[in-house]
Amino acid sequence: MLDIINLDKTFVLDGQETNKKHAIDHLSLRIEEGDFITIIGSNGSGKSTLLNLIAGSIEPDEGQILLDNENIVTLKNHRRSRFIGRVFQDPMLGTIGDMMVEENMFLANHRGKNTGLAWGLKKKQREAFRNMLEPLGLGLETRLGERMKNLSGGQRQSITLTMATMNSPRLLLLDEHTAALDPETAKIVMQITDDIVKKAHLTTIMVTHNMRDAIRYGNRLIMMADGKIIFDARDEEKAQLTVEELIKKFSEKTGDVLPDTVILNK
Amino acid sequence: MNIFYNIFTNSLNLGLIYALLGIGVYIAYRVLDIADLGAEGVFPLGGAITVLMIVLGVPPAVAVLIAFIAGGIMGLLTGVLHTKLKIPSLLSGIITMVMCIPLAQLINGITNSFESYSRPGDFVGSVTVIRMNTIFTFFRGFLGEWGYILASVLVITLIIGLLYWFFGTELGITVRATGKNKVMSRAQGINTDSRVILGLVISNAIVAMSGSLFSQFMLTSNSTFGQGTIVIALASILLGEAIMLFKKTNFAVSLLGVFVGSFAYQLVINLAMRVLNDNGYLKLVQAILFILILCIPLFKKNYANLKKKMKAKRNANA
């Protein structure tokens, strides 16, 4: 479904040629239709860079990204957004605080369609939005006319999720989307995520700091270090994994100990 | 009493015309989040084009439309410089401004070549047309002095109505989203470059329209008219927001706030000028008033702090 072939990206830091960071190191990955992949790895392992490359926010130095055998590397960010849904770590980034809930949802619902001079928000659409928010169980269906910034981080992230999965995207990218939330809210948002992904059979890639989430959700787990995939487990093998095993695997493969921040998050 | 009546009507006239300028700048400054200095050049350019067109016999309303389109083209230039050539927005606006001023001068020179319309002694680049047929003439015919005000009110109502409609359409919502959050907008498949350009086209078109009305009101066109327009525009926007107190309400109300701010600003300026009795200080007074307006948030904060302290003291005493 999604084929990543020999992808490579080096960042030059501070404009100095001597200060380089090899963020993605000739990485290849094949993702099947309906896969729910969780990606873990320490800070700077290239997880977020990989998502940015797939979404097109940054351009690779080398390599191809094929979506259903069509190379999308040359497609601009906003063109790829038509078939890729995305949720960012920062709840403030995925929605616009100064605009109303319904206007935010309108933007997502209109993704990939032509924008003309017809009046934007119609009654029928509002009804549809209400029906989408109701299953979240957060009471958001009555707050369509409110500004986004009046909602909590968890509520905003739940709406961003709903928006990212509107019009069934071919790929859903989640970039540590529960990391900025308090543990209780993170749990709720994670549950909502799992419900939506399962219900719509979305092909999903989720980057996470939370090892337990990485094991509990999805059908495939990938561990990254220094821009490479160092461990890849799916289905049966993945279901049997434990946090302890993952930590062991990490030190075996890298000769390094997982940083505290990652372990503490288990 | 007559003096104050004059100050009032004069402020209302200029307040209305400059409100249009403020609305144009508002689109760039508040909706797109771009400080577009191009207004300084687009404003006199709109005036120059209008006067030339009227002198050539074009109906005033059509002349306004032509100025509107010309302003849009200059907005297109700023937008392309900024989004496609990656020049910082502030510089893009300055480049457009620098290009507009000699253009306005050139056009005024052409108008001047129709000698019968110009006054002897006017320097090149400035045109005064006393017998000019303007968009105000018709209304002045049956309403006298208040005809000017009615004409401006009609134009502003039309523009606010059109903008309110536009920013509620599919396209308009994507322009607003682009101004607020580009990362999110791109993630929603919006071509943010094209939306920034479109917004700047609308903004500059309205600014040129304001310049067009200004020249028709003053019966002159001068390439230096633009000096300080950005100060007038931003002062009107900020003062309006301070007076209206509800900064982020309905879009049409926000635009109405720009008018309220523009009127209040002109009133203060006109009163100050009456006291000083020397037009040479005009820009200086405008700039000083602008500094005070920029400090309103600070005053408000200090006042709130002071109130809190007083209350604490009172509680402590009791």
Image (cartoon, coloured by chain):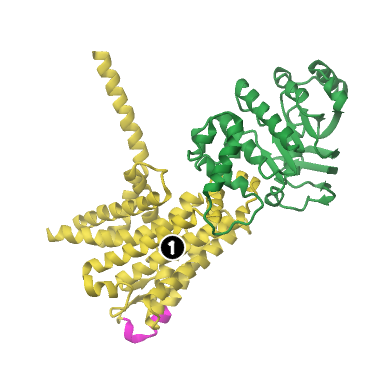
**Horizontal and vertical percent for residue B267?**
25, 54
Q: Which residue is more in the foreground, B115 or A66?
A: A66
Chief secondary structure of the magenta portion: helix
Image position, residue B310 (x, y; %): 27, 23
Q: Which chain is yellow?
A: B
Q: How many marks?
A: 1
Q: Where does residue B75 sit, x and y in percent of width and height?
A: 52, 63
Taking the magenta stretch, the answer to whether it contains residue B113 is yes
* Boundaries of the magenta span: B109-118
Q: Is A239 a magenta residue?
A: no
* Residue at image point 58% right, 35% down: A133
Q: Label 1: which residue?
A: B206
Q: In the image, which lettered chain appears green?
A: A
Q: In terms of image quadrants, where is residue B143?
A: bottom left
Left/right of residue B134 with respect to residue B183 in the rendered view = left
Q: Is residue A169 above or below residue B219?
A: above
Relative to B208, say whether A190 is above or below: above
Work out which quarter of the rendered image holds the C terminus of chain B and state it.
top left
